[in-house]
Amino acid sequence: MHSLRITSDRVDLVDEIDGAPTELPAVLSLLEMPLTVAKRQAAADFERSYLVRVMEQARGSVSEGARRSGLDRTNFRRLLQRHGLR
């Protein structure tokens, strides 16, 4: 699994297994996208990563994940499905 690490001067793809950042041309292509498209992609990437971490902390419990995220269970489950996590 990979995630984006965005700082003021670079975009790194971070390997979530060993935490090693690697610069990736495909990730840098975000900078070549129109702003609205790049924001939508970055938000979707963040949302998925957030859901994965919440579900890890909740030990797979949707109810607990929803509670931790501050969402009702129905909307939380819908987000999991949208990102292919359930």
Image (cartoon, rainbow, N blue to C red):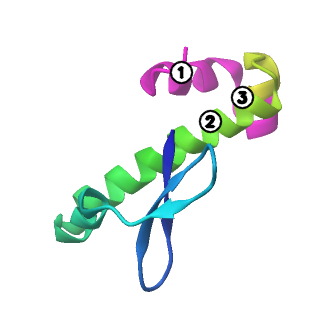
Place residue 80 in its image quadrant: top right
Judged left or right of residue 27, residue 69 is: right
Tags 2 and 1 touching, CB below 8 Å: yes
Is 84 in the magenta?
yes
Q: Which residue is mark 1?
A: 85
Element marked by disc 3 = helix
Quarter of the picture containing the C terminus is top right
Give amino acid for label 3.
Met
Q: Contact, CB < 8 Å: mark 3 with mark 2?
A: yes
* Residue at the image point whose x is 73% and y is 38% from the top: 69
Q: Which mark is residue 55?
A: 3
Residue flagged by tag 2: what amino acid is it? Leu
Q: Mark 3 touching mark 1, by CB under 8 A?
A: yes
Measure the alpha-carbon separation of dots 2 and 1.
Answer: 8 Å
Measured in 3D between alpha carbons, the distance from the residue under mark 3 to the one under mark 1, in whole angstroms, is: 9 Å
- Residue 51 — which label? 2
Element carrying mark 1: loop
Magenta-drawn segment: 67-86
Residue kind at label 1, given as amino acid type: Leu
